[in-house]
Amino acid sequence: MKWVLVAALVCAAGLVQAQDRLAKVGAHPAQPEVLIEFDKRMRMGARIVVDRGEALASEVTKAVQLRFEVGFMTSADVKADDVRLHCTLSFVEADGSIGAPVRDGVCWEGNLGDVAGKWTPVGEPLNFRPRLDDPVGATGVLLRIRDEIGKRERKLMPTFGWLPPQ
């Protein structure tokens, strides 16, 4: 879970939130790891790594398999609240166009008291490969996540830098 510490450092550096970057994703440097405060109870992180490892996908130069992961953490003394998280995942091209959802449904359900102070994965990791004909530039995985009980909704969008072989 060493990426949790890295994610916290990245967040402290003042990350740009996903909703501010959708217009021209490819014009921004890749940001393969994003950490946000979902609400006062949970901090969430999402990242894109090269599969079978922990290396962040900052610059991808061939159609290797990538892995999108998401999870959350609470404080050790969080109140015992029920949470039902609904996740919608879509790819965002370098030009800002958003594809159809590749996943849409409940991705975690439980009580925060049961996972207090622990890093908790949300849903199954999503494995994918960039295509050689994808546009050059940063490409994102947009996660819309909503607590169906608390009604809070947030977006996270880590991106990877795509530089296909010429």
Image: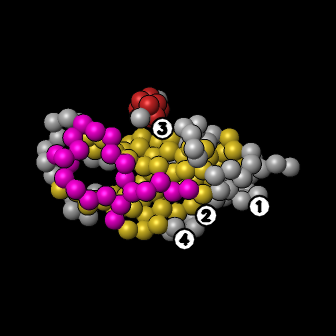
- Distance between the alpha carbons at the discs numbered 3 and 1: 29 Å
Front-most of residues 28 and 159:
159
Q: Circle 2 — which element?
A: loop
Marks 3/4: CA–CA distance = 26 Å
Marking on residue 133: 1
Answer above or below: position of 22 versus 102.
above
Quadrant containing the N terminus in the rendered view: top left
- Say which residue appears at 76% left-offset and 58% top-offset: 132
**Left or right: where does residue 76 sit relative to residue 21?**
left
Q: Which mark is first along the chain, 3 or 2?
A: 3
**Of pointers 3 and 4, the one earlier in the residue sequence:** 3
Of residue 19 and residue 129, the one placed in the foreground of this image is: 129
Identify residue for label 3: 15
Q: Amino acid at mark 1?
A: Asp
Marks 3 and 1, the one that precedes in the sequence: 3
Q: What residue is drawn where x is 19% and y is 52%?
A: 111
Q: Secondary structure at mark 4?
A: loop
Q: Which residues are magenta?
A: 106-127
Tell me the crowding category of disc 2: few under 14, some 14 to 19, or many 20 or more residues within 10 angstroms, Cα based.
Answer: some
In the rendered structure, does residue 133 fall within the stretch colored magenta?
A: no
* Disc 1 and disc 2 in contact, CB within 8 angstroms: no
Q: How many residues crowd mark 1 within 10 Å: few (<14), some (14–19), many (20+)?
A: few
The three-letter code of the residue at mark 3 reads Leu
Residue that carries the numbered disc 2 in the rendered image: 97
Residue on which disc 4 sits: 100
Separation of marks 4 and 2 at Cα, in angstroms: 10 Å
Question: Which of the 4 image quadrants contains residue 123?
Answer: bottom left
Left or right: 151 as drawn, with respect to 128: left
Inspect this view and state whether residue 40 appears. Answer: no
Badge 2 amino acid: Ser
